[in-house]
Image (cartoon, helix red, strand yellow):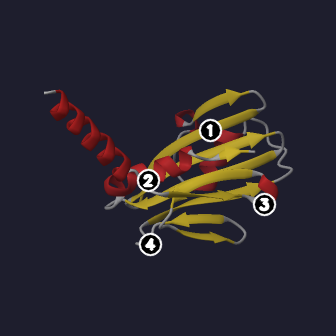
């Protein structure tokens, strides 16, 4: 019985490790941020940074804005305006952690799922956006959300 149990535990552990997707880490200019993304995704780093599946069904995009003198109270309206949505700023959640404030907003527009994460530290703003074809959202949701969650200011 002990051998059977050991084999089952070994197989479960092997399967769990096998199921994890390989990732790469991208470090932003001047090591300002890092983000982990699936190793088979494409990366474009022009004026904004894009991380997207090969199937081109969506992307995680990062925009960086320095010297933005926008109050924390104004940022929810800024997010709504940037997203060009009829959303309500009160639907945006806010988390404060020391000198960093993070805003989260989710919505669907034209069969595209959007998840917005805005991170503000001082006058620097990082605007992260997931956009994913609504027909692919359930299949790709976890990879997109894991990528977004991995974002770190350095």
The residue sitting at 86% across, 50% down in the picture is 67
- Pick the residue in front: 15 or 1: 1
- Alpha-carbon neighbours of circle 4 within 10 Å: few (<14), some, or many (≥20)? few
As drawn, which residue projects farthest toward the left? 1
Q: Which mark is residue 103?
A: 1
Task: Say whether disc 3 or disc 2 marks the residue closer to the N-terminus.
Answer: 3
As measured in the structure, the alpha-carbon distance from the residue carrying label 3 to the one carrying label 4 is: 24 Å
- Is residue 99 placed above or below 81 in the rendered structure? above
Q: Are marks 3 and 4 in contact (CB under 8 Å)?
A: no
Q: CA distance from mark 1 to mark 4?
A: 28 Å
Circle 4 sits on which residue?
Answer: 54
C-alpha gap between disc 2 and disc 1: 20 Å
Residue that label 3 marks:
29
In space, the residues marked 2 and 4 are separated at their CA atoms by 13 Å
Residue at 83% x, 44% y: name it: 123
Mark 3 to mark 1 CA distance (whole Å): 22 Å
């Amino acid at each position: 019985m002990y051998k059977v149990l050991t084999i089952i535990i070994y197989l479960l552990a092997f399967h769990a490790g096998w199921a994890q997707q390989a990732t790469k880490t991208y470090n932003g200019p001047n090591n300002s941020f890092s983000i982990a993304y699936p190793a088979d995704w494409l990366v474009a780093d022009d004026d904004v940074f894009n991380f997207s599946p090969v199937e081109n069904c969506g992307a995680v995009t990062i925009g960086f804005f320095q010297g933005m003198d926008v109050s924390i109270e104004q940022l929810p309206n800024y997010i709504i305006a940037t997203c060009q949505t009829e959303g309500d700023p009160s639907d945006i959640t806010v988390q404060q952690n020391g000198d960093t404030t993070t805003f989260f907003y989710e919505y669907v527009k034209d069969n595209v799922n959007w998840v917005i994460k805005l991170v503000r530290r001082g006058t620097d703003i990082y605007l992260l956006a997931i956009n994913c074809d609504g027909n692919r959202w359930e299949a790709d949701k976890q990879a997109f959300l894991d990528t977004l969650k991995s974002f770190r200011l350095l």
